Image: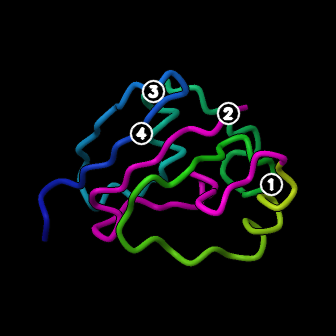
Amino acid sequence: MKELIKITIIDREGVSHVFEIPPDIGISVMELCKANDLPVLATCGGMALCATCHVLVESGTSLPEMQNDEALMLDQLPNMEPNSRLSCQLKINEKTDGLVVRLAEE
């Protein structure tokens, strides 16, 4: 088992925040952002109902397949990109080691 998972989050000013966390911590990228005071609203609390945790995947490993509720929510955004995801739906585990995401413009 890998000791730590590396996740990089680029804020809206272009500053990279690199986190190394245990693989079994059981949180999402959204929860990592909120725990580190990055400007993610996440008003629905991680239920894929609001899109206020929208990120752009800059590079990544094998991400979980997008579910219908996430796709429908992203489809409503004016700034959706092909690499858009909701950070609440990206659970951190060994498969997400090396993930780099950028906070989408509000």
Residue 70 in the image: x percent, y percent? 73, 65
Q: CA distance from mark 2 to mark 1?
A: 18 Å
Viewer-nearest of discs 4 and 3: 3
> Mark 3: which secondary structure?
loop
Q: Which quarter of the image is occupied by the C terminus?
A: top right
Viewer-nearest of discs 2 and 4: 2
Viewer-nearest of discs 3 and 1: 3
Q: Which mark is residue 9?
A: 4
Q: CA distance from mark 2 to mark 3?
A: 11 Å
Viewer-nearest of discs 2 and 1: 2
* Amino acid type indicated by mark 4: Ile
Q: CA distance from mark 4 to mark 3?
A: 9 Å
- Compared to residue 30, the image places residue 15 above or below, namely above
Residue that badge 1 annotates: 49
Residue that badge 3 annotates: 14
Circles 2 and 3, Cβ within 8 Å, touching? The answer is no
Q: How is the image coloured?
A: rainbow
Residue 44 in the image: x percent, y percent? 76, 45
* Amino acid type indicated by mark 2: Glu
Residue 23 in the image: x percent, y percent? 26, 60
Disc 2 or 1, which lies upstream in sequence? 1
Q: CA distance from mark 3 to mark 1?
A: 27 Å
Disc 2 or 4, which lies upstream in sequence? 4
Residue at the image position 52 percent from the left and 33 percent from the top? 34
Residue that badge 2 annotates: 105
Tell which of 81 and 18 is nearer to you. Answer: 81
